């Protein structure tokens, strides 16, 4: 969740957890909720309780891997959501993640341009 910023929509997490690579995301967030690191906001929003908590979670990803991690998240979301009419919230999350890892687009062997 830290890759998406201080808050994200549960629908993004729901779609992401539909991927084999990210199937444990929802369980991890349930633990973070019960431990008080994140909280549910208005309907469908998950938010870190403090920016420093989000920063600490994000810093668990090595700096050298962050851009590829973002790209992989965006690509996974895109492959799950492609042609499903997911709406603006999920579409913006996909675009944001791919944009953060845009350097990996030309390195992606699965992508044909």
Image (cartoon, rainbow, N blue to C red):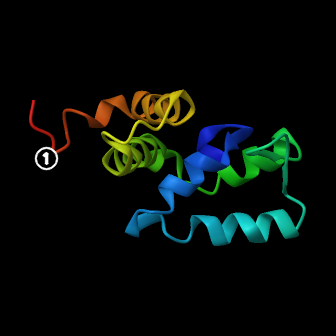
Q: Quadrant of residue 78?
A: top left
Q: Is residue 83 above or below residue 19?
A: above
Q: Residue furthest left?
A: 112
Please tell me which residue lies in front, 20 or 59. 20
Element marked by disc 1: loop
Quadrant containing the C terminus in the rendered view: top left
Q: Residue drawn 74% across and 68% down?
A: 30
Q: Is residue 29 above or below residue 70?
A: below
Q: Residue furthest front?
A: 85
| Residue 102 x, y percent position in the rendering | 35, 29
Q: Quadrant of residue 71?
A: top left
Q: Residue drawn 31% across and 48% down?
A: 79
Please tell me which residue lies in front, 75 or 101. 75
Q: Residue drawn 15% across and 41% down?
A: 111
| Residue 95 x, y percent position in the rendering | 43, 29
Residue 37 as seen in the image, left or right of residue 21:
right
Residue 38 as seen in the image, left or right of residue 29:
right
Q: Quadrant of residue 43?
A: top right
Label 1 crowd (10 A; few <14 / some 14-19 / many >=20)? few
Residue 57 as seen in the image, left or right of residue 36:
left
Residue 15 as seen in the image, left or right of residue 60:
left
Q: Is residue 99 above or below residue 14?
A: above
Residue at image mark 1: 109
| Residue 49 x, y percent position in the rendering | 88, 47
Please tell me which residue lies in front, 23 or 101. 23
Q: Is residue 28 above or below residue 6?
A: below
């Amino acid at each position: 969740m830290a890759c998406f910023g201080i808050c994200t929509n549960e629908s993004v997490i729901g779609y992401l957890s539909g991927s084999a690579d990210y199937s444990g995301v929802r369980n991890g967030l349930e633990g973070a909720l019960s431990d008080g690191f994140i909280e549910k906001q208005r309907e469908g929003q998950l938010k870190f309780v403090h920016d420093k908590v989000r920063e600490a979670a994000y810093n668990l990803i090595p700096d050298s891997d962050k851009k590829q991690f973002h790209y992989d998240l965006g690509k996974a979301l895109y492959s799950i959501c492609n042609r499903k009419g997911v709406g603006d919230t999920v579409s913006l999350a996909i675009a944001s993640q791919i944009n953060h890892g845009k350097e990996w687009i030309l390195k992606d062997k699965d992508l044909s341009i």
